[in-house]
Amino acid sequence: MLRLTVYGGAGEIGGNKILLEDGDARVLLDFGISYARRKLFFEEYLKPRTAAGLTDLLVTQVLPAVPGLYRHDLLKLADHGLPLHDEPLARAVLLSHAHLDHAGHISFLDERIPVYCSLLCHRTLLAMQDSRARDFETEITNFKPRPAFRRDRSVRPRPFRAVEGDFAAGGLTCRALPVDHSMLGCVVFLMRTSCGNVLYTGDLRFHGPEAHLSRAMLEAAAAEGIWMLITEGTRLDATERRTEQHVFEECLAAVCAVRGPVIADFAPRDLYRLSTFLRIAEETGRSLVILPQDAFLLDRLRGLHPLVPDPRAAPILILKERKQSGTYSEKDYETWERKVLGWPTVRTSEELRAEASRLILALSFWDVQNLIDLQVGPDALYIYSASEPHDEEQVIDQRRLANWLDLLGVARLDSHASGHAAQPDLVRMVRTLQPQILVPVHTEQAALWRQLVPETTIVEPAAGVPLVF
């Protein structure tokens, strides 16, 4: 008997938290943040209280109230009635990739549950955690047991296992198959269960720079035979299939026509898009200016993938932002920043002004005030190369961005290719794999599957309700 319980990702995009149980085998497929649920109760200045452990997250149902999953130190601080446990419910987490809607809530899991993922995924998560202030919501790769006191520097590592190809986890034999997405190191998991092979897609696309990986995954999975497919459907209702090459050609033409600086706004840690703008910089004789956090990630991933450039070498430059005292004092920066800011490619805004017309600045809305220091004006172009806003807060941010660009007189171009497969590719995937059962997750259009693949049995999950096979 196989039980599948979707605690997050049912009827929503992101927040995947899926428990697969097969006899003694118990594995979690991702354990991410449901941003839609979290935004109902929390925002920048109203956050879950560390001092209350998991109380706020459990009461608001941002975390599912499942016994046996969470860290004892946070359960002891919580006032919500989840009991302490001797052994964790899950024996492993199979983590598809490092986006926080798939990985973010690993922070709260019992530290005895090992996490299996690609080496690139693990290194990305390490870089993300090491380059931000410690917070109990961001303690994915290691954590500080609570309550923590000022002089308590103890940090407990979480067990990560880098995998490729065949491996064993949580009582199952599994296979990790790399796929293309908007982040390096993404994998699909094939699990061999008592009912048949189960394939969990995480997030994937078939139109990116490494689309060959997704095609190879399909061929390998089809050869093994798939009984159940647990698949994302973020863009199940979309037929448009813009590629990264479209973005490159469109943006290259636009940059060639601009005399002043170019600002490229794309998703953080999308190194495919960074590579696209790096190519454009090289072809137009410009430098690509990145932030220290980007440089820190590149340094951590250097040598692991051919698309990862050396942040210490041209045509990359690193922007040294003014902080705290405004004097560029070493004391203004965190320890990790000081390491990066000692590299020869670092420049201040004042140093960059003289060559502004030869720059592509990898900045987002959150960095827009740097444009004042760089004295960006009407000869500049702002290229928005990220997904469209999908909630009210992001719509408001877009209005603020428009206000800034109007104030500075900067023109805007939108050019993007999604990190998710569109409808034709998703349908082709299902018809290639020919699963007996399809469980839709990470989509708001689950019912559409019945129209698109009527030959397949569609089993729509409800959050927290076990499916038994």
Image (cartoon, rainbow, N blue to C red):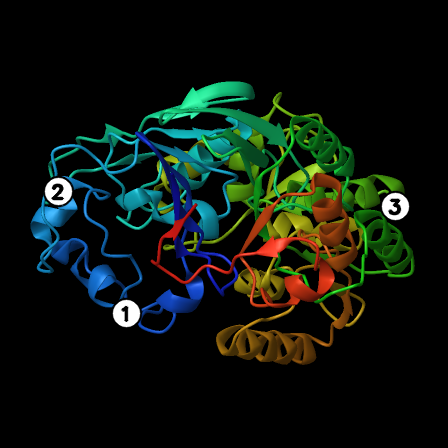
**Residue depicted at 87% across the width and 61% down the height:** 258
Q: Earlier in the sequence, mark 1 or mark 3?
A: 1
**Residue depicted at 31% across the width and 43% down the height:** 107
Q: Amino acid at mark 1?
A: Leu
Q: Nearer the viewer, residue 469 or 463?
A: 469
Q: CA distance from mark 2 to mark 1?
A: 22 Å
Report crowding for label 2: few under 14, some 14 to 19, many 20 or more residues within 10 A (C-alpha).
some
Mark linked to residue 73 = 2
Residue highlighted by disc 3: 284
**Residue depicted at 42% across the width and 33% down the height:** 126
Q: Quadrant of the N terminus?
A: top left
Report crowding for label 1: few under 14, some 14 to 19, many 20 or more residues within 10 A (C-alpha).
few
Element under disc 1: loop
Q: Amino acid at mark 3?
A: Thr
Q: CA distance from mark 2 to mark 3?
A: 54 Å
Element under disc 2: helix
Residue highlighted by disc 1: 46
Position of 88 with respect to 301 (left or right) is left
Q: Earlier in the sequence, mark 2 or mark 3?
A: 2
Q: CA distance from mark 1 to mark 3?
A: 45 Å
Give coordinates of residue 383: x percent, y percent.
Answer: 74, 62
Q: Earlier in the sequence, mark 2 or mark 1?
A: 1
Give coordinates of residue 297: x percent, y percent.
Answer: 53, 36
